[in-house]
Image (cartoon, grey):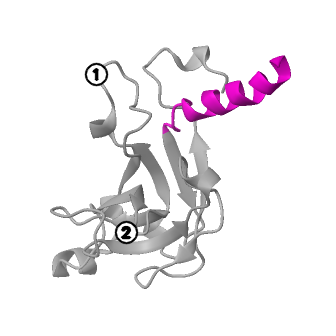
């Protein structure tokens, strides 16, 4: 009986593990997609924790100095854009991860500009995978790799985790 419970305890612990605080996206062919994606502060509860059943989303502000001066004058630059790393539930109930420029009015729709995507396996639904991303029409090869950083807990609680 006791050993049977260990597996259940581990599963429950994994289900309630806080998400990473940030991701480093690197190696993407669309170079300005690379950078640090921070957990979206709009999704953090008042107590500093994250709703374990809530949506997971990370944001990255493309630095203004990414553009050359000619692009900035023509209004065609990418500097200052906000990119998102987020999970989307498709009509089929399959979960996909995207690196996108989300539409301001209807995020998570076909109005987003998707650069990279990943169709999740069941065990990848809570956190985006490190590898296995595919390039979308708006992106350029190669697809990126992701590295998670720390966990999303209130300030000062980082040392009370098993990370």
Residue nearest the observer in this picture, 93 or 87 = 93
Residue nearer the viewer, 148 or 29:
148
Report the residue at 41% width, 46% height from top. Answer: 56
Is residue 3 rendered magenta in the image? yes
Q: Is residue 128 magenta?
A: no
- The image's mark for residue 46 is 1
Q: Identify the element where label 2 is drawn.
A: loop
Q: Are dots 2 and 1 in contact, CB under 8 Å?
A: no
Please tell me how crowded label 2 is: few (under 14), some (14-19), or many (20+) other residues with Cα within 10 Å.
few
> Which residue is at 51% across, 15% downward?
157
Give the residue furthest to the front: 1
Label 2 vs label 1, nearer the camera: 2
Mark linked to residue 70: none
> Could you tell me what secondary structure mostly forms the magenta stretch?
helix
> Residue 74 at x, y = what percent?
18, 82
- Which callout, 2 or 1, points at the residue further toward the start of the chain? 1
Start and end of the magenta stretch? 1-21
Quadrant containing the N terminus is top right
151 displayed left or right of 3: left
Label placed on residue 91: 2
Compare residues 100 and 61 and report the one nearer the observer. Answer: 100
The alpha-carbon separation of the residues under discs 2 and 1 comes to: 32 Å
147 over 135 or under it: above or below: above
Residue 94 percent location from the top left of the image: 48, 64
Percent of width and height locating residue 111 = 24, 74
State left or right for residue 156 relative to residue 17: left
- Quadrant into which the C terminus falls: top right
Residue 141, compared with residue 93, is above or below; it is below
């Amino acid at each position: 009986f006791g050993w049977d419970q260990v597996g259940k305890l581990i599963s429950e612990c994994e289900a309630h593990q806080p998400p990473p605080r940030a991701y480093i996206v690197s190696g993407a062919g669309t170079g300005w997609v690379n950078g640090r994606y921070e957990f979206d502060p709009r999704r953090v509860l008042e107590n500093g924790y994250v709703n374990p059943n809530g949506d997971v989303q990370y944001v990255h502000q493309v630095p203004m100095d990414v553009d050359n001066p000619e692009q900035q004058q023509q209004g065609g630059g990418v500097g200052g854009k906000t990119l998102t790393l987020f999970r989307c539930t498709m009509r089929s109930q399959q979960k996909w991860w995207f690196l996108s420029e989300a539409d301001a009015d209807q995020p998570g729709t076909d109005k987003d500009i998707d650069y990279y995507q990943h169709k999740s396996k069941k065990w990848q639904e809570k956190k985006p995978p490190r590898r296995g991303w595919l390039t979308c029409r708006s992106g350029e090869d190669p697809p990126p790799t992701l590295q998670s950083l720390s966990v999303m807990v209130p300030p000062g609680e980082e040392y009370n985790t098993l990370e």
